[in-house]
Amino acid sequence: MDLSTLVELAYLASAVLFVVGLKRMQSPATARAGNGLAALAMLIAIAATLIDNEVVSWAGILIGIAVGGGIGAVAARTVKMTAMPEMVGVFNAFGGGASALVAAAEYVRLHALGLDPDAATGVTIALSLLIGTVTFSGSVVAFGKLSGRVSGNPITFPGQKPFNALLFAAILLAGAGVAGLVAAPGGLTATSLLLLFSGLALLLGILLVIPIGGADMPVVISLLNSYSGLAASAAGFVIGNMVLIISGALVGAAGLFLTMLMCKAMNRSLANVVFGAFGQSGATAALASGEKKPVRSVDAEQAALVMAYAQSVIVVPGYGLAVAQAQHELKKVMDLLIERGVDVRYAIHPVAGRMPGHMNVLLAEADVPYDQLFDLDEINGDFGSTDVVLIVGANDVVNPEARNPDSVIAGMPILDVDRARNVIVVKRSLSPGFAGIDNPLFYMDHTMMFFADAKKAMADVVREVRDT
């Protein structure tokens, strides 16, 4: 069997592993194995490509695996759970940037040889450059917003939409020049045209993300993930690599499906997310003008008593749980309650946290059994017959204001925790969530506010439940 046949078989095996890996990622129980299969598929594809094109030797591949694997292992072990969305944003940027570089390299190679690419190749080069570059700069801005280096509020300026329209028109003209469909504007050289096109695309990526508020960042991260897949697929067409086309298409489709599911969970259209400037300062200002209302506060002893003598408890985790790293203490509390015969379940809202699946990963880290996790649709009808709902660090996803047609979150599907017999909210203060609006749940008669850091609060409740 010759080398080319072995490479084709490696590509086929890689494509199958990508599909199987993606299939296994749909369940928390098999997601880790699915991620491993997808990583193995990418390793096989990269090794086959490097060997087939005689780019590096086996020794070079092994060194690359050791260095890259070492960096990945250190990053995975040291990154904080709350920083996972930023890490995904960086990965999206790397993916988009790499695809753009592949397209740019092919463009430079063809012109260095004095070859004019055909229309199909030219268009795919331009598309890969455009999508990859927009993904890169957009992901960098998303990373900045998530990490606090860039304001999480929507950033707009007068005449922004007309400016974006002009920018897009300029990108189309430059892209047509890169694709060879029209003569280079202004007599630009191939290299100058490439730099101009890339620069305009970088600017477009920035301008597309800065008007989006922090509340919509989970959706933006999913959308950029889809873009990075599309950019990779386009790069696969540029260099004629089938496995890159397949893997990119899978990532692009998965990211798009997730984006649409996230939009459905927020009851908003994708256009509204991208152009709606949700979470702007006006909503926070409305909160500041509201009247002060009394709340019913409890301590660890009272919270433990309420839960210890309940028959059923539903936990609603949120971003505050991740910030405090309180998942392990929370698990201890729930284990003690289960030992006392309490029925314990966890309700996961699709947009809880700052990244799709954030809460599932967080609870998996504390070894919370998967069969105790329930999605919004599965558990929402059970709150009316539940004794206690324990909310740890969640806010907007349990805000009854979503039922108010005049609210900025009107129509957003929420967990109906206010219909439970008792509600305990663990929170540092009454500050609003990402949406920037007050939460009437905090002031209801059957709601008890437990003002504390989530980790310390859960640790105190553990002691009290043991003594009860």
Image (cartoon, grey):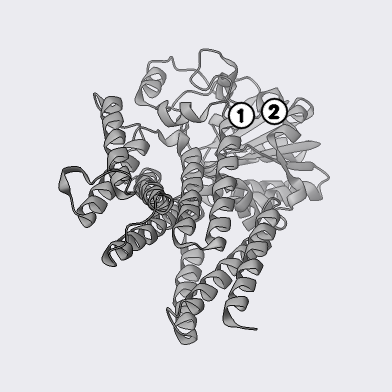
Measured from the top left, where is residue 231 in percent x and y?
45, 51
Report, in whole angstroms, how far the alpha carbon at label 2 lies from the one at label 1: 8 Å
Tags 2 and 1 in contact by the CB under 8 Å rule? yes
Disc 2 crowd, CA 10 A, few/some/many (<14, 14-19, 20+): many
Q: Secondary structure at mark 1?
A: strand
Residue placed farthest to the right in the image?
341
Q: On the image, numbered disc 2 is attached to which residue?
A: 422
Residue occupying image coordinates x 67% and y 26%: 416
**Quadrant of the image occupied by residue 396:** top right
Give the residue type that dot 1 points to: Met
Measured from the top left, where is residue 4 in percent x and y?
57, 77
Q: Is residue 220 left or right of residue 195?
A: right
Q: Secondary structure at mark 2?
A: strand
Q: Is residue 179 left or right of residue 69?
A: left
Residue occupying image coordinates x 30% and y 31%: 164
Q: Which mark is residue 448?
A: 1
Disc 1 crowd, CA 10 A, few/some/many (<14, 14-19, 20+): many
Residue 83 visible in image: no
Q: Nearer the viewer, residue 440 or 36?
A: 36
Measured from the top left, where is residue 106 in percent x and y?
36, 62
Q: How many marks?
A: 2
Residue 436 to residue 65: above or below: above
Residue occupying image coordinates x 20% and y 53%: 192
Measured from the top left, where is residue 229 in percent x and y?
50, 51
